[in-house]
Amino acid sequence: MRNVAHAQTDAERVADLLTDELRAVGAPERAEQEKGYLKSELEFLGASVWEIRRVIQAFLRGSKPLTRDRLVALVEALWAEPMHERRMAAVALLELQPKLLGPADLPLLERLLRESRTWALVDGLAGDVVSGILVASPEAVTPVLDRWAADPDFWIRRSSLLAELQSLRKGADLGPFLRRADLMLDEKEFFIRKAIGWVLREVGKRRPAEVTAWLAPRTHRASGVTMREAVRYLPKEDAARLMAGYKEKRPAA
């Protein structure tokens, strides 16, 4: 217990020092703009994503290598305060230390995703952190993503889609993603529609035939934002045919 308490105290101290650095690179005007743009209740310091990442990279270079437990303790300490930059710093830490994470960390990541309530935090956690764990341990992660796909929280459903990004870029089977996307294709939620199109767009860069074949019989169900994203890197003829099908089959308003 003493070691645990010491680790927590150390993590809180480091989190506070990192916050001081983030505050120093923040700008009040930017803070106000970002808070309004993200419609967030969190406190904002006005530090950019790149400034946050530079602060974390400098910390990692200047400290001894993190263990998994120390990483988690620091992430928890940063996340505990309702401040956007602290939580973004926690996400950056997780992104920059992928080898320390595994399937056992999914409950923690799911909690962070549920508490994020904004794409600015969710997309890094899902598209980078969970995605990296999926690449290393698909058998352990795929059932979790299938559960997330039916979750009442649309941010969790979005995460089940974006978590496929890294593995699909490496040529993984498209089937699990398409199965989840098909379940959500009729949804009205913008962030779900955008996520489906985003992943299909990335796959379409290297595997256009698979994207075209899946979309062709579903153009009447897909939203405009999904279609526009999905066809972006497809051959012009295929993109035109799919968009024509989308426009023809939409019911009259």
Image (cartoon, rainbow, N blue to C red):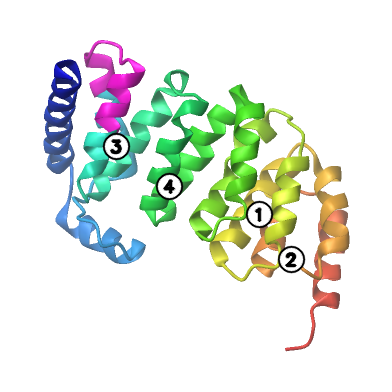
Q: What's the CA distance linking mark 3 and mark 2?
A: 35 Å
- The picture quadrant where one finds residue 227 is bottom right
Cβ–Cβ under 8 Å for marks 2 and 4: no
Neighbours of disc 2 within 10 Å: few (<14), some (14-19), many (20+): many
At x 47% / y 27%, what residue is drawn? 104
At x 74% / y 29%, what residue is drawn? 171
Query: For the residue marked with disc 3, what is the amino acid?
Result: Ala
Q: What's the CA distance linking mark 3 and mark 1?
A: 27 Å
Q: Position of residue 34 (x, y in %)?
A: 29, 59
At x 80% / y 39%, what residue is drawn? 207
Q: Is residue 60 visible?
A: yes
As for residue 62 lying within the magenta part, the answer is yes
Neighbours of disc 3 within 10 Å: few (<14), some (14-19), many (20+): many
**Counting residues from the N terminus, which is met first, the one under dot 1 or under dot 2?**
1
Q: Nearer the viewer, mark 1 or mark 4?
A: 4
Magenta stretch secondary structure, dominant? helix
**Counting residues from the N terminus, which is met first, the one under dot 3 or under dot 1?**
3
User: What residue is pinned by disc 1?
Assistant: 196
User: What residue is pinned by disc 2?
Assistant: 222
Mark count: 4
Q: Position of residue 169 (x, y in %)?
A: 67, 33
The stretch of residues the image draws in magenta is: 59-75
Relative horizontal placement of residue 219, taking residue 83 as reference (left or right):
right
**Counting residues from the N terminus, which is met first, the one under dot 4 or under dot 3?**
3
Q: Quadrant of the C terminus?
A: bottom right
User: What residue is pinned by disc 4?
Assistant: 113
User: What residue is pinned by disc 3?
Assistant: 89
- The picture quadrant where one finds residue 145 is top right
